[in-house]
Amino acid sequence: MKVSVIGTGYVGLTTGVCLADLGHTVLCVDNNAEKIAGLKKGISPIFEPGMEELLEKGMKSGRLGFVDDIAGAVKQGEIIFICVNTPSREDGKAELKYVEKVAKEVAANLDGNYRVIVDKSTVPVKTAEKVRETIERYGTEGIKFDVVSNPEFLREGTAIKDTMEPDRIVIGSDSEKATKKMLELYKPLIDRTGAPVRLVSVRSAELIKHGANTFLAMKISFANLIAQVCEEAGADALEVLDAIGLDERIGSRFLTPGIGFGGSCFPKDIAAFNRTLGILGVDSSLVRAVEQINKSAWQRFIHKVEKELWVLDGKVIGVLGLAFKPDTDDIRNAPAFKIIEELREKGSVIRVYDPKAMDRARVEYPDLEFCGDPYAVVKGAEALLVCTEWEEFKTLDLGRVKELMQVPIIFDGRNIFDKNAAEKAGFRYFGIGRA
C-alpha cells in the first residue's frame, strides 16, 4: 500500500521505517528541511536502537522516501498518518494547533480519491471528530475520506521492537471501509506476529492510549509511595515490591521506585487526561495524586542529598545520566535536570555525563560541565548522583570510583548498585526505598 506519514519525530519516523520494512511504500514528510536532508542521507535525528539500520534498508529498497512538501505526500498516500507533536499547554490541555494545521493542509491537497486519515499522535477524546470537521470545512466539495484513531504504544529505547512485535493493535474506526484498509495495512504484521487486534470506536481508541499511560504512571507512582513508606518504616522497597509484583494480577513491570518518570509521553498524557476528566465532570483526584507523587519523588531525592551534604554551596557533585530513561537521547521532562537545576540554585558545582544525551543537553544547558566518561565526572567529587539506569553505569569499577572521589558518597536514584557491595567498597550509599 502507499502510505504517507506527516511528522518525523519518534512516532512518525518509527511508523514510517517500520511500515516500509513490512513492504509498503512510505513517504515521510516534515516541514524541517534540515531534518529531511539528514534523513535522506540516512542520518536519524534521534537515537533509537535499530533506527539507522531500518532507514538504510528502507531507502535502498526504494520503499522509503522523505520530503518537506506536504502536497506530494498527501496526493500519493492511500493512508495518511498524522504524527505531529501535541505538547501540554500551561493549563494541562494538549496543544492541538499542529494537528489542526496538518488537517488544513491535508484538506487543501485532497483530490477525488478516497483516503484514510489516521490520528497516530496521542490526542484527547473527540479529536478525530475535530479533524474531520476541519477537513470538511477547508477541503473542496466531494472529497472522500474517513478519520480513524490508531494509537501507538511505543517506548523510547525499544520503539522499533514495540512496533514490529506489538502486544496489541488498536484500530478505532466508525467506517467499515476504513477498517478494511487498516487491516490490509497491518496484515503482514498480524500474519507474522499473531498480535491481537482490537477493532473499537474512534472515541474508545482515543481513550485507550491515555488510559494505558495513566495506569503505567500510576504503577510507578505507587512504587515510589511504597519506597517512601519503606524509608520511614525501616523496610526495603525492593523486597516489598518484588513480592507484590509476583502477583499475576499486578505484575512487576513498571513497579520500580526511582526519582520519577519523565519523557514526552507520561507527563503530557497524564496532564491531558486530567483535563479531559475535568471537562467531562469526572473526579480526577487519582490522576492528580499520580502527578503529585511523581513530583515528590525527585524532590525527596534532593532532600536526601541536602540532608547528608549539609551545605550545598560550593559542593562538587557528579551526575551520571541525563536522558529520562536509558537507550534514548531524549531529555524532555527528565528528572535529572530538575535535580540539577535545584542543586545549582543552591550553589553546587555540577559535572555530568550521559552516553547518548549530551549533545541535546548542550543545546539546552550550554553552561554545564560535560565530561567524557563516568570517571571524569567523579574525580574530586563530594557526591555522585545516578539519575539514569544506563547499563554502562552498572558495571563501573566502584573501587576506582572511590579512589577518584573526594568524599565517597553515592545517591542512587535508580537503585542500580547493590547496597551491600557499595558499602563494602567504602561508600556511604543512599538508594530509593532502602532502609
Image (tube, rainbow, N blue to C red):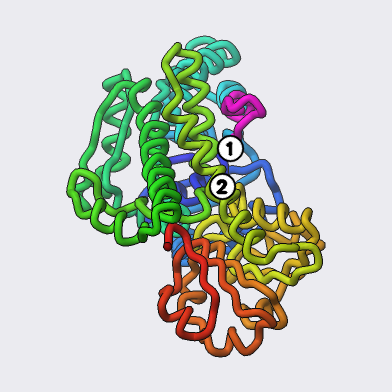
- Frontmost residue, 221 versus 407: 407
Q: Earlier in the sequence, mark 1 or mark 2?
A: 2
Point out residue 211 in the picture as x, y percentages from the top left corner: 37, 32
Question: Regarding mark 2 in the picture, which secondary structure is present there?
Answer: loop
Residue type indicated by callout 1: Asn
The residue lying at 51 percent from left, 16 percent from top is 130
- The quadrant in which the C terminus is found is bottom left
Distance between the alpha carbons at the discs numbered 1 and 2: 8 Å
Range of the magenta residues? 87-100
- In percent of width and height, residue 6 lies at 55, 39
Q: Is residue 424 above or below residue 3?
A: below
- x 56%, y 16%: residue: 134
Q: Which mark is residue 225?
A: none
Please state, as top left, top right, bottom left or bottom right, where the N terminus lies in the image: top left
Question: Mark 1 touching mark 2, by CB under 8 A?
Answer: yes
Q: Nearer the viewer, residue 43 or 389?
A: 389
Disc 2 packing (10 Å; few <14; some 14–19; many ≥20)? some
Which residue does the image show at 43% across and 44% down from the upper left? Answer: 221
The amino acid at mark 2 is Gly
In the image, taking residue 373 as reference, residue 62 lies left or right, namely left
State the residue position of label 1. 85
Based on the picture, tell me whether residue 305 belongs to the magenta stretch: no
Q: Secondary structure at mark 1?
A: loop
Within the magenta stretch, is there residue 89? yes
Q: What is the chief secondary structure element of the magenta stretch?
A: loop
